[in-house]
Image (cartoon, rainbow, N blue to C red):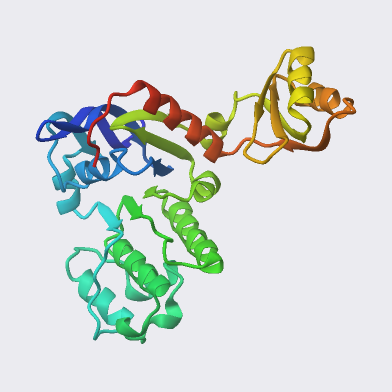
Amino acid sequence: MTTMAIECRGLSKRYGAYPALSNVTIAIPEGRTVAILGPNGAGKTTFIHLWLGLLHPSEGICFVLGRSPRDAINEGLVGAVLQETALPSLVTAAELLTQIGRFYRRPLPVKDGLALAGISELASRRVDRLSGGQRRRVAFAMALVGQPRLLFLDEPTESMDLDAREAFWHQVGVWAEHTGRTVCFSTHNLSEAERYADDVVVLSRGTLAAFDTPGQLTRGRGARVRFRASESSARALSARLGVNVRALSERNRFEATGADLDALLRAVVSDPACSAFEPVKDSLEDAFRDLVGRHDSQAEGGMML
């Protein structure tokens, strides 16, 4: 039987009269890397804080590794790197990990924690002399000290440049593959979610909009080809092919959507009134915008935290 890292049933949270999270039911198996996505006000923070044991639900129930969130935290089964992590200044990275390790029964050796976070060279560097990205890596090492079965990362690469981001995700992948543990992370970087997540949770207006793999979420949106033409030519093309053609923000630029990319591209290319053809590959960002847009159009207004 598969053990669930996180299991929520009818999970809801209200702040006064306003629903921040409404009837979320989800089961995340162990051993997956999961991105938690949603626009500002979607309920992500509330959802995360509920299964980190920082909030109590108004309704429903949440289990973390088969326990209450508080019990999972108290047993050292959950590691977290929150967006705002204050670190003591006048200690080295190694000294800090040593201190953190004293809170756990079987802490990860300091040298292993530094290596897994990719910061072995920072062991003797004082924390106040580290860059923002390096501090995030130290916080990551701190979260690994207790050898958690579930690791949560909140906007983990926000202060990192491109090279540092790629190095960070490499280290996360090494840790997850080596241990078989679960990683959940929140991010506004949808390309990062598409590249590194096994599964994606999408929240919108406090409800669960989707829970699937990035590949499944980006399928089924139809083939698309962008091209340049006059408005009248675009309308004529739409009528002739029987496909949807929409205007883009750039003047005289359109996008045709059909069932078959090859057939659609051949038809558009063969039209002498069209030029500058560009097949469009669906991305997680496209799917995300569609999902959130549909939920926004259906949902009533309300305050989401």
Residue at image point 43% right, 25% down: 294
Image coordinates of residue 219 in percent, x first then y, are 59, 28
Quick check: can you spot residue 8? yes
Image quarter (top left, top right, bottom left or bottom right) of the C terminus: top left
Image coordinates of residue 95 in percent, x first then y, are 27, 81
Image quarter (top left, top right, bottom left or bottom right) of the N terminus: top left
Image coordinates of residue 48 in percent, x first then y, are 26, 44
In the image, taking residue 155 as reference, residue 270 lies left or right, namely right
Image coordinates of residue 169 in percent, x first then y, are 49, 59
Residue 157 versus residue 23 in the image, above or below: below
Residue 157 versus residue 15 in the image, above or below: below
Outermost residue toward the left? 16
In the image, taking residue 71 as reference, residue 25 lies left or right, namely right
Quadrant location of residue 93?
A: bottom left
Quick check: can you spot residue 31? no
Residue 168 versus residue 11 in the image, above or below: below
Residue nearest the observer in this picture, 276 or 52: 276
Residue 137 versus residue 50 in the image, above or below: below
